[in-house]
């Protein structure tokens, strides 16, 4: 799934979806979609190193003759090329990092966004962040205390698992459908009272 599918049209559609959900609930949703949640330089360097090592092995053991002064230059160039290729490839970055590292990266970025975007500072503690990171194929959902107090734990966990499943194969239509289902849960347990002002923007943040 390419992040290119999460385009401006998707952004507008999700913004309308958020407005409709917030008409029926006091919860305030913020959606963030990012291409990547952290630096994967170590994966880029590792791929560059392996490519350079492969080239070095070829140069040393090849039956063809090479001038030795070209060897260091070739190794350096292929290292740089490998690192660059990896930096443009979600597949390679996932391949050369552990799932535990990727999960921690997304959780850290989502937690930072929860405070950075002011979601933790709503008057009624009704802020809710839905954070989707495309490279890691992971979704994080962070809700403030006002919401967690009102939604039964079993129902919350069930919906949370559904949202996580969508994050593993991010697709705009499935993401929107899961959002609508989640909105119904919020409407049933955290209904709109007309007393909670809209303190957070409805427009999703796309950082692609």
Image (spheres, rainbow, N blue to C red):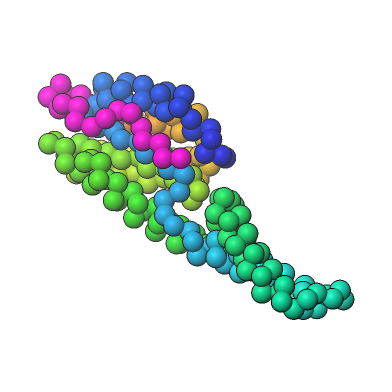
Instruction: Give the residue drawn at x 21%, y 41%.
Output: 118
Looking at the picture, how far across and down is residue 171, in whole percent?
52, 35
Q: Which residues are magenta?
A: 186-208
Instruction: Give the residue drawn at x 57%, y 67%.
Output: 46
64 or 198, nearer to the observer: 64
Looking at the picture, how far across and down is residue 10, in whole percent?
46, 27
Instruction: Give the residue drawn at x 49%, y 33%.
Output: 6
Regarding residue 126, the answer to whether it shows in the image is yes
201 drawn magenta: yes
Regarding residue 150, the answer to whether it shows in the image is no
> In the shown orientation, is residue 11 left or right of residue 188?
right
Quadrant in which residue 198 is drawn? top left
171 drawn magenta: no
> In the shown orientation, is residue 124 left or right of residue 87?
left
Instruction: Give the residue drawn at x 48%, y 51%.
Output: 136
128 or 108, nearer to the observer: 108
As drawn, 98 above or below 207: below
45 or 23, nearer to the observer: 45
Q: Main secondary structure of the magenta part?
A: loop
As drawn, 175 above or below 115: above
75 or 118, nearer to the observer: 75
Quadrant in which residue 60 is drawn? bottom right
As drawn, 134 above or below 185: below
Q: Residue furthest right?
A: 63
């Amino acid at each position: 799934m390419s992040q290119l599918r999460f385009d401006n049209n998707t952004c507008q559609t999700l913004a309308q979806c958020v407005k409709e959900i917030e008409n029926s609930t006091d919860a305030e949703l913020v959606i963030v979609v990012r291409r990547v949640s952290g630096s994967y330089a170590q994966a880029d360097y590792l791929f560059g190193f392996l490519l350079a090592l492969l080239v070095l092995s070829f140069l040393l053991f090849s039956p063809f003759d090479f001038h030795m002064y070209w060897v260091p230059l070739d190794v350096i160039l292929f290292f740089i090329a490998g690192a660059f290729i990896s930096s443009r490839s979600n597949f390679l970055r996932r391949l050369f990092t552990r799932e535990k590292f990727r999960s921690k990266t997304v959780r850290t970025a989502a937690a930072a966004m929860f405070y950075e975007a002011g979601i933790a500072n709503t008057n009624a503690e009704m802020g809710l962040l839905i954070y989707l990171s495309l490279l890691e194929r992971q979704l994080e959902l962070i809700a403030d205390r006002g919401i967690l107090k009102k939604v039964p734990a079993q129902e919350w966990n069930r919906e949370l698992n559904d949202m996580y499943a969508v994050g593993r194969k991010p697709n705009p239509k499935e993401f929107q459908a899961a959002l609508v289902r989640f909105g119904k849960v919020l409407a049933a347990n955290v209904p709109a009272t007309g007393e909670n002002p809209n303190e957070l923007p409805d427009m999703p943040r796309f950082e692609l």
